[in-house]
Amino acid sequence: MKIKHTYILLAMALVVFMGCSDDDGPLAIPHIRQAETQTPPTPSFTSGSADFSTYVSVGNSLTAGFSDNALFAKGQAVSFPKILSERLALAAGSGFAFTQPMMADDVGGLLLGGQQIAGPRLIFDAQAQVPVPFPGTPTTEVTNILSGPFNNMGVPGAKSYHLLAEGYGN
């Protein structure tokens, strides 16, 4: 029985090693190799009959750009609604605008009347192998009212039933 298993393992190893080759070997496919060196054409975007002039996103932390345990400007700049809006703008043309309420800094955290009520974002300390608070003081005051309208209505921590609550997110 052991000899049978040995032959099976030897056959499998032989198949694996025979299946490996370099790109310049006799099994190379010339038309694929040539296509890899050519520059792909730049696509042209069109909206067709779709109207992309208005795009509104509603959601929770992911929609708002919450990451590293805080909401901060760089996190908001790479939120999925912002990225999607940049792609939609390619098809919509010059009339497309996407606005979202932005944090005042990249530290994260919040102030209420000058007192810190939410800590800064977390960064990884490679030496200690733990997340640590970002050095700095938050500058985003929650009592500062931003003027809208906004296209990104993401609220960190929101649940689906919160959407029905009047004034939620004010």
Image (tube, rainbow, N blue to C red):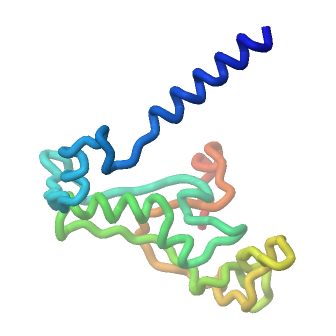
Label tally: 0
Quadrant containing the C terminus in the rendered view: bottom right
Q: Where 105 falls versus 24 (above or below)?
A: below
- x and y percentages locating residue 116 in the rendered image: 79, 84
Q: Where 147 falls versus 40 (above or below)?
A: below
Q: Where 19 falls versus 28 (above or below)?
A: above
Instruction: Single out the residue that lies furthest toward the right.
Output: 128
Does 151 sit left or right of 15 as displayed? left
Q: Where 53 falls versus 15 (above or below)?
A: below
Quadrant containing the N terminus in the rendered view: top right
Does 13 sit left or right of 84 as displayed? right
**What residue is rendered at 40% in x and 56% in y?**
56
**What residue is rendered at 25% in x and 66% in y?**
96
**What residue is rendered at 53% in x and 31% in y?**
16
Does 63 sit left or right of 8 as displayed? left
Seen from the viewer's position, the closer of residues 168 and 34 is: 34
- x and y percentages locating residue 59 in the rendered image: 55, 53
Instruction: Single out the residue that lies furthest toward the top.
Output: 1
**What residue is rendered at 57% in x and 80% in y?**
103
Seen from the viewer's position, the closer of residues 102 and 38 is: 38
Seen from the viewer's position, the closer of residues 92 and 163 is: 92
Residue 25 appears in which quarter of the rendering?
top left
- x and y percentages locating residue 117 in the rendered image: 79, 79
- x and y percentages locating residue 148 in the rendered image: 43, 73
